[in-house]
Amino acid sequence: MTMPYAHAFWSLGDGNGEIRQAELSLCGDLMVRTCYSAISRGSETLVFNGQVPVSEYQRMRAPFQSGDFPGPVKYGYSNVGVVEQGAHDWHGRYVYCLYPHQTHYRVTADDVVPLPDDVPPRRAILGANMETALNALWDAAPGIGDRISVIGAGVVGSLVAWLCARLPGAHVQLIDIDERKRFLGDALGVDFRTPADADDEQDLVIHASASDAGLQTALLIAGFEASVVEMSWYGSRDVNLPLGQAFHARRLTLRSSQVGSVSPSHRARWDHKRRLSLALSLLDHDCLDVLISGESHFRDLPQTLKRLSQGDNDTLCERIRYD
């Protein structure tokens, strides 16, 4: 089957996007037809609106990005497809690839990770989110029996809380200002709280709300000599943080977690592909479907990303379908 062209989504960097024809690479032994992709609301809305800081242009590049920041740029990294051309043992297999939103693409076998048999393709789009959550846990190093708070009930924050709740004896509270997200606590088996009724004296606080108020709450509820792990990325926006008051007296530790590098605790033995393979295997629980709260078609991506980038707070993960 010959397919010299595909169609891809491009962010223009000014709050707009468009679908363009894409010429397929002649390199790579696998031809993949995309079934689903996912929008990473944190990074992709910043890209869509042209808010990537100049200092981060190189670090923010996606593995198969085309174009340069601020745009136009073909950007994305959560793609689930089926192999339509390739070696016999690959043909018909569902794979995960860090590829942008595009109908078809050609890559090498080393560029993809086969989906585990018990992870449906419709859910596997959470792979990049789970990889981020997994790396955060390696950075944060939660312990058995810890009192753990996760602030920000988005997709990544919810996954972090779900992973932490599987530690024996751990008490996990998922904190968000939006009461409508209380259903996430029930679905994921964690204690949902608003900032007003959150417990303090926490052993570990992980912040993922990308808001000044959320990080301020994290410092407020952390116990003596506790750690606060910052997962949010703010692009070019400044953050107001009260490092006076009791911050020093309580000897708090504030550290960052960023998925672009494997956590130092695992870096010597884990590469990105091994980490992603583990992340995909952790998606074998039906309860995680609750995190995919919206679905739209690839052809509507320009309008979908505009809606999400303008403050649609009702959508957790937006799944893009290509049928």
Image: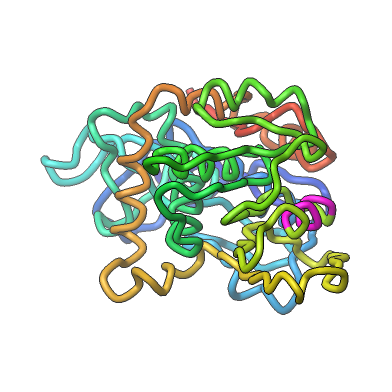
Residue 214 colored in magenta in the image: yes
Q: Which residue does the image show at 43% across and 29% down from the upper left?
A: 123
Q: Which residue does the image show at 81% across and 57% down from the upper left?
A: 216
Q: Which residue does the image show at 62% across and 54% down from the upper left?
A: 205
Q: Please give left or right for residue 6 compared with residue 150 in the image.
A: left
Of all residues, the one furthest to the left in this rendering is: 88
Query: Please, which colouring scheme is shown?
Result: rainbow
Q: Which sits in the foreground, 15 or 180? A: 180
- The reply to whether residue 250 is visible in this rendering is yes
Instruction: State the predominant SS element of the stretch in magenta.
Output: helix
Q: Residue 63 at what x, y percent from top left?
A: 47, 63
- Image quarter of residue 242: bottom right
User: From which residue to which does the magenta span run?
Assistant: 213-218
Q: Residue 145 at what x, y percent from top left?
A: 44, 47
Residue 42 colored in magenta in the image: no
User: Compared with residue 199, is residue 285 higher up or lower down, i.e. above or below?
Assistant: above
Q: Please give left or right for residue 239 compared with residue 157 in the image.
A: right
User: Compared with residue 96, is residue 292 higher up or lower down, i.e. above or below?
Assistant: above
- Image quarter of residue 173: top right
Q: Please give left or right for residue 238 compared with residue 60 in the image.
A: right
